[in-house]
């Protein structure tokens, strides 16, 4: 059984930047995705990723902030989305 897409959204904000969210529910948890979700959230400014959250194969949960990669503690998908949008707002205020 394949992963089930549970959310896909792509929006252009007031600055012309793109926020895109892709979330999949896995048929069963895996060693590198024990929570059972695969995800990719990205904020793109002037064709460059400035914020990203993902759990690419064998890399575990992590986030990208202006090119730096940092571990991310996954709690649930709602917290993931909240953290992503919080970072976007911090970026817009010049705090990231």
Image: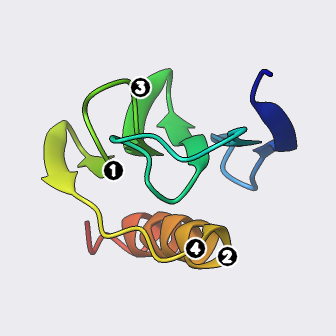
Report if residue 18 is visible in the image. yes
The one of 53 and 27 positioned closer to us in this rendering: 27
> Where does the image place residue 9, in percent across and percent down from the top left?
84, 43
Q: Which residue is mark 3?
A: 48
How much space separates mark 3 and mark 2, taking CA atoms?
A: 25 Å
Q: Residues within 10 Å of mark 4 (few under 14, many from 20)?
A: few
Image quarter of the C terminus = bottom left
Q: Which residue is mark 4?
A: 76
Specify whether 52 is left or right of 8. left
Q: Which residue is mark 2?
A: 78
The one of 77 and 50 positioned closer to us in this rendering: 77
Q: Which of disc 1 and disc 4 is earlier in sequence?
A: 1
Q: Which of disc 2 and disc 3 is earlier in sequence?
A: 3
> Where does the image place residue 41, in percent across and percent down from the top left?
57, 44
Q: Disc 3 vs disc 1: Cβ atoms closer than 8 Å?
A: no
Where residue 85 sits, quadrant-wise, is bottom right
How much space separates mark 4 and mark 2, taking CA atoms?
A: 6 Å
Where residue 39 sits, quadrant-wise, is top right
Q: Element type at marker 2?
A: helix
Image quarter of the N terminus = top right
Residue at image point 43% right, 46% down? 33
The one of 25 and 1 positioned closer to us in this rendering: 1
Where residue 59 sits, quadrant-wise, is top left
Specify whether 63 is left or right of 56. left
* Residue 32 - label: none
Closest to the camera, between mark 3 and mark 1, is 1
Q: Which residue is mark 1?
A: 61
**Location of residue 4 with respect to 88 vertically, above or below:** above
């Amino acid at each position: 059984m394949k992963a089930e897409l549970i959310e896909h959204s792509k929006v252009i904000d007031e600055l012309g930047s793109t926020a895109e969210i892709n979330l999949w529910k896995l048929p069963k948890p895996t060693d590198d995705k024990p929570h059972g979700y695969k995800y990719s959230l990205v904020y793109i400014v002037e064709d460059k990723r400035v914020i990203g959250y993902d759990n690419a194969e064998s890399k575990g949960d992590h986030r990208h902030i202006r090119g730096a990669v940092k571990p991310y503690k996954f709690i649930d998908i709602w917290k993931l989305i909240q953290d992503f949008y919080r970072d976007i707002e911090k970026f817009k205020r010049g705090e990231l």
